[in-house]
Amino acid sequence: MSNESKALAAKSKSLDAKQVGNVLLNNALIIIMLLVAAYVAVTQPSFLSPRSLVNLLSLTAAYLPVALGIGGCIVLTGTDLSAGRAVGITACVSASLLQASDAANKMWPNIGTLPIPVVILISVGLGALIGAFNGFFVAKFKLHPFIVTLATQLILYTTLLLYVQQGNNKGMAISSLAPDYRNFVVGNPPLLNFGKIQIPNYVIYALLLTALMWFIWNKTTFGKNMFALGANEEAARVSGVNVLKTTIMVFALAGAMYGWAGFVESARIASNTANTGVNYELDAIAACVIGGVSFVGGIGKISGIVIGVLMLRLIFVALPLVGMDQNLQYLIKGGIILFACALDMRKYLVKK
């Protein structure tokens, strides 16, 4: 073999090793999570029991709509810190309108129990309105989404504190929900009833929402405009993208997802207070970044968001089984977000 051939072979091996190293580093967070899950599965066999897996699936489905909404905001190089409070206010509104007619502390006794489809429209519409409010200030006044949504978070929390004081509620938890409402959300269809293992309806709803969001992101002009705007706003504007309209629609769609999440969460936890939905945006942002939605803009996949939510729930289901203090969960979330953002920026700098 000539010296030139040897040099080429050595260079090829070096490139292969570098590529493998990059792949491992870029996916380090997911690899670490899988290793932790594998360790827990070995040391705690109950972790892989059907009941535990259904619990993991159910938690993923409950948190997924919020992540699907925030994902679009991150694609636009933004974020949404008001998501958790939007979930909270739509959950409390849904609960107050769907309390059982004979509830002892019925918040609005004069209006009875509204039909479920009407409350879905109210909750999703309220969420979309909140999102559109955020999007308008971001696009019209060129304010950073962090500032806008932080302000909205505070406004929503104040509104929610005032709302739970209204009617006959007087600040108490909103509970005693109508059985039909609970069954609509947490009941289970016959096809998903496996004796003691029952998959709730909201898992099916989450799958349908995921399919809808995949279609919107990948098969519509709106989705293409969203990615173009996130990648390069000026280029998108020159190409004919309506920046104001697209930004408002992205945030409104995110808000609609929060509204649906609030409707589901209300029935899932069955007792709603002003703290319902608190910090849900942290889980959603972490899941999106884990799933490859980049803060540099214009990059992200629905499948990645689903994987991110699943991985995050996997960790928070697994760690208590090995005796980790629940009080450390926010430390872990913060570390995950920081590490994921650092990896995301590294990918961006390597490409640049």
Image (cartoon, grey):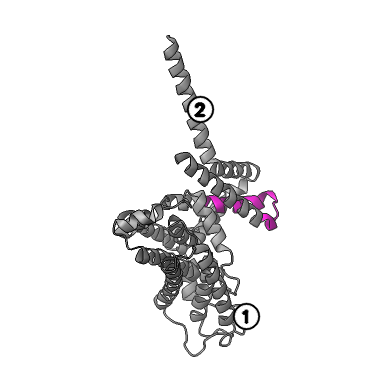
Position in image of residue 100 (x %, y %): 51, 81
Magenta-colored segment: predominant secondary structure: helix
Query: Where on the picture, by quarter, is residue 6?
Result: top left
Q: Is residue 198 left or right of residue 238?
A: right
Q: Residue at x 47, y 88 (%)?
A: 111
- Which one is earlier in the sequence, the residue at label 2 or at label 1? 2
Q: Residue at x 48, y 81 (%)?
A: 97
Identify the secondary structure beneath mark 1. Answer: loop
Q: Residue at x 54, y 74 (%)?
A: 156
Q: Is residue 337 magenta?
A: no
Q: Is residue 52 left or right of residue 320?
A: left
Residue 231: image tag: none
Q: Which residues are magenta?
A: 309-328
**Circle 2 residue:** 17
**Circle 1 residue:** 172
For the question of whether residue 336 can be seen, the reply is yes
